[in-house]
Image (cartoon, coloured by chain):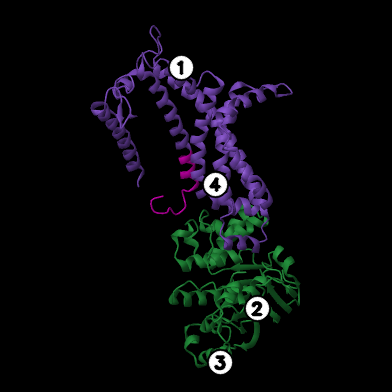
Chain colours: A green, B purple
């Protein structure tokens, strides 16, 4: 599926200005360079208004950059989106109320024009992967928040894209469900060897999940630090209690210190958060 | 509310109206009342306000002296005639309304240009429009197609029905959550796919009340069209005919009026059925 030797994501000299040329012009991202190798799990972390969600949407081609170049899977971002080279999950699971769980997972396959039998088989495989097989015929509102988010992940991965883009997917979940979901996400991505770009503002979440944590600062949004996390590929409950884990958490926290939190100029922050 | 309770409250409301009617007949002034010189209290005599039981029993009696068919049969066949026209008008109006809503949702300039005229169209009095539609229809000859007179009535029903459908559906199609639209974009869905797989299903809660309005509006449109174009066979025509006999047979006109009301309810019920089917798996808001 992915071109041999191609980077999962390649971002060069990326800038994004909202409302360019108008009085309420906001520079959201300035001169971003980021290369992500296949198989990596990269978190974008920073205070709100640092443009991490904007960067994710630019990679997803849901927004057009003001300048710079974005390659996904070796292709221009737009081509990658049209080829469904990535799947995406948002903070709100965003399942369709009128579709059963299995029909929700089938959605991207349906849009690609797969036939009924083939997509049902794949959707059931995906539900098996997220351990929700027995809920296939339930409707979204009958599931808990964590289960809904698992369905959303199954949907995002249904077409077996090499890349998964996630925008604070566990932000609305309680702490316990959240930790469980993090472990599940690592297992799922390990089994499917999916590259992940993950936006969060939780430091422990970023450290636990990632091979690399990208630290960003607001006004204008830019990358200030990149922290490599070498906790190995097998991470479990013990990982969260290991000294190495806390050291990395401290390292990311240090990198975030000195970054002036947004919110001092709330009007600008809101413009950036809601492009 | 459970369905059984709804049926009960509906029946109770009917009985209550009958009770209030009879109560007024009992205490109200026989020849109308004046308050400070204004004649505002309706006359309570049997000619102006027949007894409820007289109206109901009138259904079983023959339509006119010497006739063998009961008035029930006559009203029923008139209602059936009007029902088919109203249903045609409703379907036609819904199709036009949906088409306009999709166009307006797709192209903002269509919405800006068209919506004021749609609103304007509803201010044209139906009574004035009805003869025009009949004469336009009469001049229409496409191939072997002859414009039947009943089609004018159906068109007038559609004229009233399309408006709530267009406005309600437009509202629903443009109220899609932005996050869901972003999701469809991330799956590279076409505008058409987004329309049928997301926008329309998400718009159903907005469309159902609009369709209910359209259902009753199409009945009103057809009945008024029957009256003003002189189309025979429907319940609208019966209302006019029977009203002329109001002095000698006051209960008679009410049989036709109730027939028209029942008609509206049946069409409304059909829409409720659509609602139940399309929303069967969705969470219901409290009281909805």
Image point (51%, 58%), residue name: A101
Task: For mark 2, give the secondary structure.
Answer: loop
Task: For mark 4, give the secondary structure.
Answer: helix
Mark 3 and mark 2 lie on one chain; the one further toward the N terminus is 2
As measured in the structure, the alpha-carbon distance from the residue carrying label 3 to the one carrying label 1 is: 90 Å
Image point (58%, 88%), residue name: A259
Q: Pointers 4 and 1 in contact (CB under 8 A)?
A: no
Q: Position of residue B95 (x, y in %)?
A: 60, 39
Q: Which residue is the site of mark 4? A: B168
Q: Which residue is the site of mark 3? A: A254
As measured in the structure, the alpha-carbon distance from the residue carrying label 4 to the one carrying label 1 is: 37 Å
Q: Pointers 2 and 1 in contact (CB under 8 A)?
A: no
Question: Tag 2: Cα neighbours inside 10 Å, few (<14), some, or many (≥20)?
Answer: some
Instruction: Please say if A238 is above or below A149.
Output: below
Q: Position of residue A126 (x, y in %)?
A: 57, 64
As measured in the structure, the alpha-carbon distance from the residue carrying label 4 to the one carrying label 3 is: 54 Å
Disc 4: host chain: B
Q: Which residue is the site of mark 1? A: B241
Q: Of discs 3 and 1, which sits in the foreground?
A: 1
Using the image as rendered, state which of residue B140 and residue B244 is in the foreground: B244
Mark 4 and mark 1 lie on one chain; the one further toward the N terminus is 4
Q: Tell me which segment is drawn in magenta.
A: B271-288
Task: For mark 3, give the secondary structure.
Answer: helix
Using the image as rendered, state which of residue B188 and residue B12 is in the foreground: B12
Q: Is any part of residue A10 visible from this angle?
A: no
Q: Which residue is the site of mark 2? A: A39
């Amino acid at each position: 599926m992915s071109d041999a030797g191609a980077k999962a994501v390649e971002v060069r000299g990326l800038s994004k200005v909202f409302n360019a040329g108008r009085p309420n012009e906001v520079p959201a991202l300035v001169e971003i360079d980021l290369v992500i190798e296949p198989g990596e799990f990269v978190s974008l972390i920073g205070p709100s208004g640092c443009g991490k969600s904007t960067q994710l949407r630019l990679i997803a081609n849901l927004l057009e950059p003001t300048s710079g170049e974005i390659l996904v899977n070796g292709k221009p971002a737009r081509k990658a989106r049209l080829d469904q080279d990535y799947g995406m999950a948002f903070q709100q699971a965003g399942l369709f109320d009128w579709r059963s769980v299995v029909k929700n997972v089938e959605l991207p396959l349906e849009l690609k024009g797969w036939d009924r039998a083939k997509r049902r088989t794949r959707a059931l495989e995906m539900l098996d992967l997220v351990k929700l097989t027995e809920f296939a015929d339930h409707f979204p509102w009958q599931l808990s928040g964590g289960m809904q988010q698992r369905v959303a992940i199954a949907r995002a991965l249904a077409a077996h894209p090499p890349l998964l883009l996630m925008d604070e997917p566990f932000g609305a979940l309680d702490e316990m469900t959240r930790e469980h979901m993090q472990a599940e996400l690592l297992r799922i991505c390990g089994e499917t060897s999916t590259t992940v770009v993950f936006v969060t503002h939780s430091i422990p979440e970023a450290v636990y999940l990632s091979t690399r944590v990208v630290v960003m600062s607001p006004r204008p949004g830019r990358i200030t630090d990149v922290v490599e996390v070498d906790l190995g590929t097998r991470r479990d409950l013990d990982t969260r209690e290991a000294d190495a884990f806390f050291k990395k958490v401290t390292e990311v926290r240090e990198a975030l210190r000195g970054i002036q939190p947004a919110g001092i100029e709330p009007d600008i922050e809101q413009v950036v958060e809601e492009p | 509310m459970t369905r059984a309770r709804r049926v009960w409250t509906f029946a109770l409301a009917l009985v209550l109206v009958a009770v209030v009617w009879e109560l007024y007949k009992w205490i109200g002034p026989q020849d109308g009342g004046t308050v400070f010189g204004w004649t505002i209290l309706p006359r309570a005599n049997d000619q102006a306000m027949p007894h409820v039981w007289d109206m109901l029993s009138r259904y079983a009696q023959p339509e006119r002296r010497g006739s063998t068919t009961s008035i029930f049969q006559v009203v029923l066949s008139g209602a059936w005639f009007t029902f088919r026209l109203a249903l045609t008008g409703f379907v036609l109006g819904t199709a036009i309304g949906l088409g306009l809503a999709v166009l307006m949702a797709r192209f903002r300039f269509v919405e800006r240009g068209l919506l004021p005229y749609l609103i304007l169209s509803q201010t044209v009095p139906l009574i004035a429009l009805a003869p025009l539609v009949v004469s336009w229809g009469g001049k229409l000859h496409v191939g072997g197609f002859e414009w039947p007179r009943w089609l004018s009535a159906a068109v007038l029903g559609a004229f009233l029905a399309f408006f709530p459908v267009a406005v309600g559906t437009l509202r629903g199609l443009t109220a899609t959550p932005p996050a869901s639209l972003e999701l469809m974009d991330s799956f590279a869905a076409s505008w058409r796919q987004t329309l049928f797989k997301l926008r329309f299903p998400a718009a159903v809660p907005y469309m159902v009340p609009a369709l209910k309005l359209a259902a009753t509006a199409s009945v009103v449109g057809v009945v008024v069209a029957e009256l003003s174009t002189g189309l025979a066979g429907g319940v609208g025509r019966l209302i006019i005919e029977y009203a002329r006999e109001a002095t000698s047979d006051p209960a008679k006109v009410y049989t036709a009026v109730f027939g028209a009301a029942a008609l509206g309810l049946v069409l409304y019920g059909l829409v409720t059925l659509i609602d139940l089917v399309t929303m069967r798996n969705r969470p219901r808001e409290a009281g909805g």
